[in-house]
Structures are given as structure tokens and as C-alpha cells.
Image (cartoon, grey):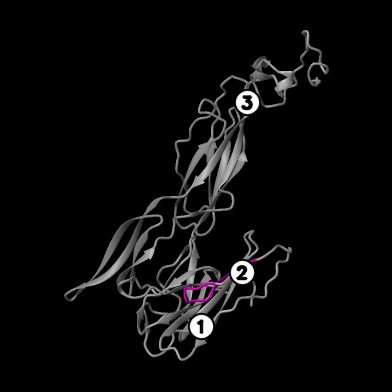
Amino acid sequence: MANASDPNGDPLAYYWDFGDQTFGINSPTNSKTFRATGNFAVRCEVSDLKGGLSSAYLLVTVGSPTNYTISGQVMDDNGNPVQGVRVHDGNVPPNGNYRYTFTDSQGNYTITGLDPGNYPVETFLYGYKSSPPFLDFVNPIPIFGSDAVGVDHILTQVPRVSVSVSSNAFEKFGSPGVFKISRTGSVAQDLTVYYALSGTATTNEYQVPTNNPVVIPAGTNSANLQIVPIDDGQGLGPETLTLTLLLATNDIRLSTVVTNTGTNQLIITVTNMVTFPGWDLLAINPLPVWFQTPPVYVLGAKAEATMTIVEGTAPATPLVSVIPVDDAAVETGNDSAVVLFTRMGSVQSNLVVNYTLSGTASNGVDYVALPG
């Protein structure tokens, strides 16, 4: 039974994993009969379906298991527990059975059903980096005769990038608009950020930036992208320009491997061109091991921003036309006639169009009274 409540009174959804490839129903109360001997991490996730999520697990022991467990905690580099991390034993068939679990709200986990052997325990969560050196253990972990406890990991959050508008662009004064692209996390290295532009503004109204991607220099947490306006003299009113941040699709990663050639020890630098999602080759004591590649950066809460390019020329008097779309209405056929009003020129504000009616048909007698 899961005891959970939402402070806003939102309804809750429940996800149950019994740790043996079976699952429960969407209810705070579930029942399960285990018919096999072993350790089972029974896990429950509770969601308010609006982004709020909490989870916990309980280790259930049935009989006298002959296999073992690995347990520990996953934290970020600020010491906060990280929920939802996939922790696995590093086995890939046919070398062994792949065993995995997920951390709960306190960052705790337990991998069950492990036969005696050596296990390169690894972690993965999108938006975080997990790689050697590990916190307080040597990988791979030997499991012979007892469970492994205290196998704790530290995840480093990769940069999160966001964009905002510092100022709009003005055609009349030639004043450039400014997008500000920011990052979180370490500023030790340059960060290359990709983007795309869209909106109602065309390239006749601004100079296309030559710096795509934008580089946030080392030592700073943001970079500005200037949009230089062009006065097109058309007086069509303000236009919009939207910058949308994009994820990097690949990166070059360097790693070192220590090897021996006879009596000499060599340090080899390995260069990998990795893609996202993909795999990265890293050294573990001192064997090379494949890890899932963390992205260069992830998108923050504000991955899109829109600036206004303010018109430099006063709008001309709009040209209004009326066009018959359906010029016949049949009284007995539940039919209507339709005319379309159009305008040419600026559309930056509402336009009130006056009209008169004439002809042999009477307004409100032969047809439903028209306003205006």
C-alpha cells in the first residue's frame, strides 16, 4: 500500500513494479504473491500528472536466496539525491543477464538477482554525466559470497541552456535586438550552442547572423546574439523573430587508456566521434568500457524566445476591398451569401471598415439584419 497525497488536491496516478517482470494496477493498494525464491525490489511511483513525481521501494525477500544484491545511493555533485536514475550491472547478453533498477526519491537503489561474478555497475539519466572516477568503490564490483552495499555514485549535471530577449530591434534607429543565451553549470570550457530562427520577419528585415552556432566563452555563463534590423521602408508594422535552441547531434570526446608493451607503460589518448544518443569509450581499471554518451548540453525551461522588429516607416493608408465569395442565397434552402473584406498594408492593429447596403432586398426583411 502506498500512502501518498498531493498538497494541491490533484488526483494521483500509481505505477507498481514488483521486480520480477510483473506490474501492478493504477491504485494505491496492490497485492502480489511471489512464487519464486529471491530478493525483489518492489517499487512504486506516484505522479500528480503535472510533473510532480515521488517514488519509493521495499526489498522483499522470499525464502533463502542463493544470489546477491548491489545497493547504494546516487547523488548529484551538490550532495542532493537524484531520482529516476537507471542503475545496471553492465552485463550484455550473451555474457550475462542484464539486471537493472531505478533510484527512488532518496536516490537509493538495489539491484537484485545477481549470480557470483564481477559487475561493472553503471548509471544513466538524461541530462547528467556518469563516468569514472567513482565515489568510494572500485569497478567492476566483485560479488562472491555476500551482497555489495554502499555502492554510491555521483552524477554531474550537464549544462542547461536557455534563451531570453534582452532588447527588441528598431528599424528606424538601426538599433539591433539582442538574444541572450545562458548556461548553467561549469564555465571552465567554451560551450557551442545551436539554434534556428523563425517568425513573421523575413531576411529583408534583418541581417542573418553569421555566428550559428553561438559559442559561450570559457569563464562566462552567457553570450549575446545581435539581430541587426534592415529598414525595408514598407511600413507593414512590427514583425516577430523567434530563436529556438537546438540540441547538438554529435561531439568529439577524448579519453585516455593505460596499456603495457613489454616492460613499458603507455598512455594512449583515444579520440571518439560520438553521436546523441550513442556510446562513449572510457577506461575503467584500466580496461576500456562503453558508456552511454551524456549530451553536450540539454535544453532548459526557456528554450525559445521571440523578439519584435519594430517598423521604421509609418504605415500607409490600407487599401480595402470586398469580394463576393458566394453571391447567391436561396431563402428556402437554408443558404447564405458570403462576401469577404480584405486589406493591404499594415496589419499591426484592428481596422474598422464602414459599409452601406443598397439594392431591392431589404435589410432585416429579406435577410437577417446585418450589423454596422
For the point 27% across and 70% down, the residue is 258
Is 91 drawn above or below residue 52 in the view shown?
A: below
Q: Nearer the viewer, mark 1 or mark 2?
A: 1
Residue 154 is tagged as none
Q: Earlier in the sequence, mark 1 or mark 3?
A: 1
Left-right relation of 357 to 123: right
Tell me the element at label 3. loop
Residue 311 is tagged as 3
Is 367 drawn above or below residue 305 in the view shown?
A: above
Give how far across and how far down residue 310 sits, in percent. Answer: 63, 29
Q: Earlier in the sequence, mark 1 or mark 2?
A: 1
Distance of label 1 from label 2 (alpha carbons)? 25 Å
Task: Indicate the amino acid at tag 3.
Answer: Glu
Distance of label 2 from label 3 (alpha carbons)? 50 Å
Residue 54 is tagged as 2
Camera-side residue: 348 or 47? 47
Q: Earlier in the sequence, mark 2 or mark 3?
A: 2
Give how far across and how far down residue 311 sits, in percent. Answer: 63, 26
Left-right relation of 8 to 206: right
Q: Quadrant of residue 91?
A: bottom left
Distance of label 1 from label 3 (alpha carbons)? 71 Å
Tell me the element at label 2. strand
- In the image, the segment drawn in magenta is 13-23
For the point 62% across and 25% down, the residue is 172
Left-right relation of 147 to 262: right
Give how far across and how far down residue 73 sits, in percent. Answer: 51, 76
Identify the residue under disc 1.
34
Q: Residues within 10 Å of mark 2 (few under 14, many from 20)?
A: some
Q: Is residue 80 magenta?
A: no
Q: Are marks 2 and 3 in contact (CB under 8 Å)?
A: no
Give how far across and how far down residue 261 sits, in percent. Answer: 18, 72
